[in-house]
Amino acid sequence: MTTPPLARETASGREYYNFQTKEAAPSVTSILKVLSKPDVERWKLRMAADCANESWDEMTSWHPDERKQAMVNAHEIYTKGRADIGTLVHAVCEKIIKGIPVEVPKEAASYIGQFGKFVMDKRPKFLESEFTVWSREFCYAGTADALAVIDGETWLLDWKSSKGAYPEFALQLSALRQADFLIRSDCSEEPMPQIDRMGVVHLRPRSWRLIPVKEELAAECFIAFSAARDLFRWKDEVAGHVLGVVA
């Protein structure tokens, strides 16, 4: 996703800034980075090992610092490539929804083809695309991918092009749903619409799925997100001050 209006990068991650009220709030995605992901850490180690195995002969002539840096950065190179695809997919989907002519980049063509199949099958009536919401009560903000009516129900939708669909996606959606208001690029505030369902539209090169968040567990998801918000605040505002001077 491209940088949304009102968003800016800080040392703690992305935050949103209301230039009318001078309020700032961390983004939903920055907050969720506090979650422990042991599988991701093991994957990073495998990427480093694969990098060393594939370039072993070449690396023998490198300076030790160069070898180390190549292995440390191996997962970032792959992740950036995936992030670039995700950004392209989001940008093209937004233009299609808004009726803006767009030339689909070759790298994203297969994903956009699956997006087209989703639209043809589910016939969503899009109400919003790439819109920002804000929670003054819990102090966070975020940008949602789309709001659409499907079979008479209003869905909050998130486009994902990752290899898998992960439970954390439900935390992100629940946070966006529970925000206090929509906020436009001019900082004007509008009431949150009634949202009946939440779901991930999982786009892959050869398939698509609309994966719903179970409504009976939606409240549990927001409770978990709220805990992550508290931990983020502790790390950002408190952790650096909890230990005193050594006696």
Image: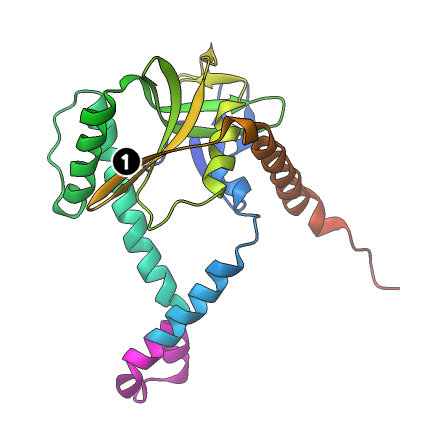
Residue at 27% x, 88% y: name it: 57
> Can residue 24 be seen at all in this image of the molecule?
no
The one of 142 and 93 positioned closer to us in this rendering: 93
Where is residue 11 shown, x and y percent of the image?
A: 52, 47
Chief SS of the magenta region: helix
Does 189 appear in magenta?
no
Colour mode? rainbow
Image position of 200 with respect to 107: above or below: above
Residue labelled with disc 1: 90
Classify mark 1: helix, strand or loop.
Answer: helix
The one of 164 and 68 positioned closer to us in this rendering: 164
Question: Left or right: where does residue 40 sit relative to residue 139?
Answer: left
Count the marks.
1
- Residue type pointed to by label 1: His
Query: Which residue sits furthest right?
Result: 247
> Can residue 215 be seen at all in this image of the molecule?
yes
**Quarter of the rendering occupied by the C terminus:** bottom right
**Quarter of the rendering occupied by the N terminus:** top left
Question: Left or right: where does residue 242 sit relative to residue 224?
Answer: right
Residue at 60% x, 33% y: name it: 220
Where is residue 154 shown, x and y percent of the image?
A: 39, 16
The one of 118 and 95 positioned closer to us in this rendering: 118
Residue at 25% x, 47% y: name it: 85
Question: Left or right: where does residue 230 sit relative to residue 222?
Answer: right
The one of 12 and 192 positioned closer to us in this rendering: 192
Q: In the image, which residues are magenta?
A: 51-71
Question: Left or right: where does residue 98 sit relative to residue 18?
Answer: left
Q: Quadrant of residue 226?
A: top right
